[in-house]
Amino acid sequence: MALIERQTVTTAIPVLNEEETEHFDRVLSADAPPMDEEAKKLYAIALAVRAD
Amino acid sequence: MFPYRNEDLRDTPLGTDRAAFSCGQADLDEYFCRHHIDDDVKRGVTRAYVLTNTTGGLIGYYTLSNYAIARTLLSSSLERKVGYEVVPAILLGRLAIQTPLHKQGVGRLLLFRAQVRAVDASRQCAARVLIVDTVDDHARNFYKRNDFQKLKGDSEQYFLDLKWIEKRLGAAAQ
């Protein structure tokens, strides 16, 4: 109960402003950052490695 | 030249015979070979994975843990984007490969494999950045070559945005 009260009092939830909202929309729809050919090949291998 | 094909590799939790492992860094070897790593797994403070070839030959290992950092330690541009004072993160605590496999792209593959697991984990329980601990200039240069940035302050930790990694994985999968 004490923990809940403390969080209620001290936690200010940040709200995205218009500029930040535009930023995230842009980032989420953007292309991947550039990478060299070796990196692209190794990322593909890393995704294909059999995992347990 | 990278010495393996996709189908040659397996990424599994601990269990492989490790006695002969050597990466050239005594503390990383001791942590892995003398079973300190098992103790940390038992304590629940890390998950450890080994990369092997199809015959069980040990290539390298890495460890991942949940983590958190103060947002003020991030680059200014990222600091402004995360909102909260404490940023959820994943720590790549240790990463090492066998000495004979150095300078063939294998370390980079192991790093990318750890990134795949970190992104998967962040989809289940949110994390914004991947943090690495660096022990020497060799390690620091390795991570810098692979796009990590130093955290602000005096620590020798570096970070990479997991959203950025996720985009790269998406591009590589196409």
Image (cartoon, helix red, strand yellow):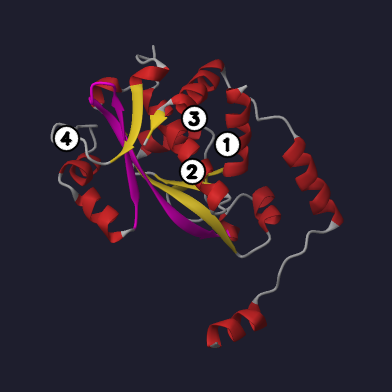
At label 3, the amino acid type is Arg
Q: Which residue is mark 3?
A: B145
Q: Which residue is mark 1?
A: B165
Callout 3: SS: helix
Marks 1 & 2, CB-CB < 8 Å contact: yes
Q: Which residue is mark 4?
A: B17
Subunit ID for the residue under disc 3: B
Marks 3 & 4, CB-CB < 8 Å contact: no
Above-or-below relation of B26 to B69: above
Structural distance between the alpha carbons of marks 4 and 2: 25 Å
Structural distance between the alpha carbons of marks 1 and 2: 9 Å
Subunit ID for the residue under disc 2: B
Above-or-below relation of B26 to A40: below
Q: Is residue B149 visible?
A: no
Mark toward the start of the polypeptide (3 vs 4):
4
Q: Which quadrant of the structure image shows residue B5?
A: top left
Q: Magenta residues, as a range?
A: B45-70
Mark 1 neighbour density, 10 Å: few (under 14) some (14–19) many (20 or more):
many
Q: Which residue is mark 2?
A: B118
In the foreground, B15 or B105: B15
Q: Are marks 1 and 3 on the same chain?
A: yes
Mark toward the start of the polypeptide (4 vs 1):
4
Q: Is residue B53 visible?
A: yes
Callout 4: SS: loop
Mark toward the start of the polypeptide (1 vs 2):
2
